[in-house]
Image (spheres, helix red, strand yellow):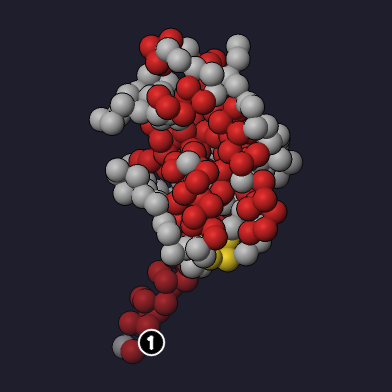
Amino acid sequence: MINKNTNYFVIPLAICAVLLVALFSNSTLELSKYSTEGLDLDFTVSEDLAFLSDNASNEIKTRNNLFPHLGKTFIGFKEALAFKESRGDYFRVNTYGYLGKYQFGKETLKMIGIHNANDFLSNPELQEKAFLANAERNKWILRKDIKRFVGESIHGVLITESGILAAAHLGGPGNVKKFLRSYGSSNFSDAYGSSVKYYMKKFSGYDTSLIVPDRKAKAII
């Protein structure tokens, strides 16, 4: 009786095992048709964004759509700064009257040869010229401080030329000199709370070698 019952269970199990092996072998052969070996695959999804949810880090996604491959180049520098200032909007005027993509004040514009705010706001080419002229002027004013402080660390912030120039765009070269020469004790902040130190850190390490120091730089089309 025991032998008969054993056979009733063993024989069906053996048959099932054989069928499963056969099925697995056929599946393996079928899957081989879909091999990617030898194909030239081109993945374009940013590693930084691949694992973000639809609602996460929208600002990062927007920035990558605007300038995804600019890195630490000069163009990357000015576009990153513009995004912080106005989200890259040439026609923005903030609550304090600062104008355009790079949020210039009217007095700064006068120093680089622009006296009509309406013309400036409606002209993207002039705004780009203004950014470069202002950076050239600031680099000339801060040339000695750039030479002296680049490479040093102040309150945990590595000082770089691009950080200095970004901070000068925010608060003017005079406030940057105060920050550097006081080793961070004097830290100007604008009306929205952005400080010289914050800009020094946020815009550190970009290539600004294309900006040539020029005391008399003007924005001319």
- For the view shown, which residue lies furthest in the right direction? 38
Residue 122 % position (x, y): 42, 11
Q: Residue at x 67, y 51 (%)?
A: 144
Can the viewer see residue 69?
no
Q: Residue at x 37, y 83 (%)?
A: 6
Q: Residue at x 49, y 57 (%)?
A: 179
Can the viewer see residue 91?
yes
- For the view shown, which residue lies furthest in the left direction? 95
The part of the image, by quadrant, that contains residue 16 is bottom left
Give the labeled residue for mark 1.
3
Residue 171 % position (x, y): 44, 43
Foreground pick, 168 / 49: 168
Q: Residue at x 40, y 69 (%)?
A: 12
Residue 63 % position (x, y): 45, 37
Q: How many marks?
A: 1
Quarter the N terminus occupies: bottom left
Instruction: State whether residue 5 is above or below residue 13.
Output: below
Residue 100 % position (x, y): 41, 23
Label 1 Cα crowd, 10 Å radius (few <14 / some 14-19 / many 20+) = few
The part of the image, by quadrant, that contains residue 4 is bottom left
Foreground pick, 10 / 78: 78
Name the kind of residue labelled 1 in the image. Asn
Q: Secondary structure at mark 1?
A: helix
Foreground pick, 77 / 187: 187
Quarter the C terminus occupies: top right
Foreground pick, 107 / 37: 107
Instruction: State whether residue 162 is above or below residue 127.
Output: below
Instruction: State whether residue 109 is above or below residue 53.
Output: above
